[in-house]
């Protein structure tokens, strides 16, 4: 029996133009998921400055000179961080909206319009992110 | 633009065979003149070639054939023309040419489709048709893929009617029950769905949409009885069964028999959850 | 809470809990973002301010549940992505335990943070 040929992953990202809506949804949901779990670990790490901060004196805390406040203010003063927060918002909003779409599919609702609901969640994500930019970037410059 | 007028009938006796033969000759003449006119109207057929036994084809390549365009021709027609007139080594599976045998599932212009069911004029690029073997399956030769894995997954769900008890006389199914499973019975084992699923591509143990749909067909068949129903559920509620489906919907999109595969898988997930919750 | 992590082999339970935690997270994540970026602004967060919120028992409890469900949902999500990708055998067992340990560590650390932010009010 001659050897058969394994072409590997054919529908991989080289063929992205041929992706269906459902496939984009799956790819984006995975990508945003990875970003969010990575963020969760870094978020708890940053917030862990609360542990030493809790030992500071009341006066230091009231003045906002504790390590927790200093760390957060320091991060927020970096412009790139502000932009990354907008990115985080986009990622979280998409994951939530597409997640709702998936929950509905799991309940057997909206299967006929599953591609339209994906496009709707993309559009809504864009709208929410654009509307939030002023709030997120205020005071950054 | 035939230059022959139909009434060049010679005085034939009313001999049916002679008349038939005359009409046959006329048709052949018309076809010949039509063929020369449309000689320039061809379809460019790009076909994936691979043959481990031929030095030239051990690395896959694409061969281009220019097949004369006929109205209503399908991709299978084009492939058969190419094989019959240009390259008799072109190898592909086909049989019924009417979308019931499931032999000719191919990757045509980027989608999984049956060759016999795909009219060339319906493709969004009807001048160039690119034909490849089904994705995520090993290629044996040209457009023929290894189907054993697909059949293994199908067999693992016990795809046969097996009631626990047989009644005396007829075993009737209600009309409603038939309606419920009707769509799931249409599967022709073509493999397009499995080929389109990214999870099936990554996870070798995943049962796949066709197998789970088969399980659905029997799970919801009232005639098998509750005990069999439970046994069937246990097969598909394992880790590489229904839970691997991520509702990508590609299977539903490509199924040539319009089976709502994702919907069926979802129903089985809900059944599994419901049956497990009862034990708490 | 440890039994939450022992059911990975039973695909059905993990699938179901992923959906339950998802429904809960839709609400709490949206709330969290809204509270800390729109109602309050991120650059204005201080320890004192955080303490003010975390001292409220209902808020503290919500945050702890938020942390627990997010940890489960995220870690289970990563595990599923790997299984879909085809991980099997030893790498799979290794990945499963690494994820479980990482998840527990994350939750424990987050819990410690929540106590620090709540001051002495909960003891």
Image: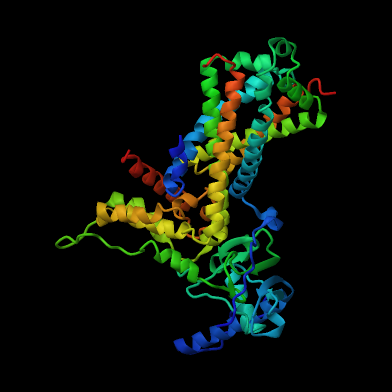
- Tell which residue pokes out farthest to the left in this image: B168
Residue at the (40%, 55%) spot, across then down: B236
Q: Up-down: is A17 above or below B99? A: above
Residue at the (52%, 35%) spot, across then down: C22
Image coordinates for residue A80, horizontal then vertical, percent:
80, 32
Q: Up-down: is A2 above or below C122? A: below
Q: Quadrant of residue B88?
A: bottom right
- Between A17 and B209, the one nearer to me in the picture: B209
- Between A54 and B61, the one nearer to me in the picture: A54
Image coordinates for residue A68, horizontal then vertical, percent:
71, 22
- Between B5 and B34, the one nearer to me in the picture: B34
Q: Up-down: is C62 above or below B7? A: above
- Between B208 and C106, the one nearer to me in the picture: C106
Q: Quadrant of the N terminus of chain B?
A: bottom right
Is residue A33 found left or right of A85 in the rendered image? left
Q: Quadrant of the C terminus of chain B?
A: top left
Residue B91 visible in the snapshot: yes
Q: Quadrant of residue A92?
A: top right
Residue A124 visible in the snapshot: no
Residue at the (52%, 75%) spot, across then down: B94
Image coordinates for residue A85, horizontal then vertical, percent:
72, 30
């Amino acid at each position: 029996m001659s050897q058969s040929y394994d072409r590997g992953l054919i529908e991989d990202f080289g063929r992205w133009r041929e992706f269906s809506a459902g496939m984009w949804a799956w790819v984006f949901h995975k990508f945003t998921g990875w970003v969010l779990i990575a963020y969760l670990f870094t978020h708890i790490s940053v917030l862990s400055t609360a542990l030493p901060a809790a030992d500071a004196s009341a006066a230091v805390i009231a003045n906002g000179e504790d390590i927790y406040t200093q760390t957060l203010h320091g991060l927020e003063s970096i412009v790139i961080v502000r932009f990354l927060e907008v990115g985080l918002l986009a990622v979280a909003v998409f994951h939530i909206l597409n997640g709702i779409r998936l929950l509905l599919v799991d309940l057997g609702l909206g299967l006929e319009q599953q591609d339209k609901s994906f496009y709707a969640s993309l559009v809504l994500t864009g709208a929410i992110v654009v509307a939030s930019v002023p709030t997120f970037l205020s005071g950054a410059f | 633009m035939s230059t022959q007028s139909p009434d060049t009938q010679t005085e034939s006796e009313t001999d049916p065979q002679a008349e038939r033969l005359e009409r046959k000759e006329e048709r052949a003449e018309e076809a010949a003149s039509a063929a020369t006119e449309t000689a320039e109207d061809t379809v460019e057929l790009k076909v994936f070639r691979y043959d481990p036994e031929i030095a030239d084809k051990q690395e896959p390549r694409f061969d281009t054939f220019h097949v004369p365009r006929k109205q209503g021709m399908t991709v299978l027609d084009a492939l058969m023309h190419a094989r019959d007139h240009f390259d008799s080594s072109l190898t592909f599976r086909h049989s019924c040419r009417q979308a019931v045998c499931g032999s000719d599932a191919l990757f045509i212009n980027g989608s999984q489709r049956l060759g016999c069911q795909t009219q060339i004029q319906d493709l969004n690029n009807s001048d160039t048709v690119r034909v490849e073997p089904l994705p995520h399956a090993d290629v044996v030769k040209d457009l023929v893929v290894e189907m054993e894995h697909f059949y293994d997954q199908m067999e693992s769900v016990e795809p046969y009617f097996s009631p626990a008890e047989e009644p005396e006389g007829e075993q009737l199914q209600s009309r409603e029950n038939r309606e419920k499973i009707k769509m799931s019975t249409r599967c022709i084992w073509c493999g397009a769905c499995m080929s389109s699923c990214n999870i099936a591509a990554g996870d070798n143990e995943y049962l796949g949409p066709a197998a789970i749909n088969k399980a659905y067909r029997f799970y919801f068949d009232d005639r098998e009885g509750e005990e069999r129903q439970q046994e069937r559920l246990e097969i598909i509620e394992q880790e590489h069964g229904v839970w691997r489906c991520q509702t990508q919907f590609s299977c539903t999109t490509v199924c040539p028999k319009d089976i709502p595969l994702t919907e069926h898988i979802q129903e089985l997930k809900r059944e599994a959850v419901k049956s497990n919750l009862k034990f708490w | 809470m440890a039994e939450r992590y022992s059911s990975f082999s039973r695909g059905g339970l993990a699938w179901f809990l992923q959906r339950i935690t998802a429904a809960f997270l839709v609400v709490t994540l949206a709330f969290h973002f809204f509270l800390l970026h729109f109602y309050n602004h991120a650059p204005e967060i201080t320890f004192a301010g955080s303490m003010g919120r975390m001292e409220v028992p209902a808020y503290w409890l919500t945050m702890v549940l938020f942390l627990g469900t997010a940890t489960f949902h995220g870690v289970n999500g990563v595990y599923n992505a790997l299984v879909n990708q085809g991980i099997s055998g030893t790498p799979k067992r290794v990945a499963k335990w690494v994820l479980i340990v990482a998840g527990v560590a994350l939750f424990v650390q987050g819990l410690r943070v929540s106590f620090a932010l709540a001051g002495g009010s909960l003891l």
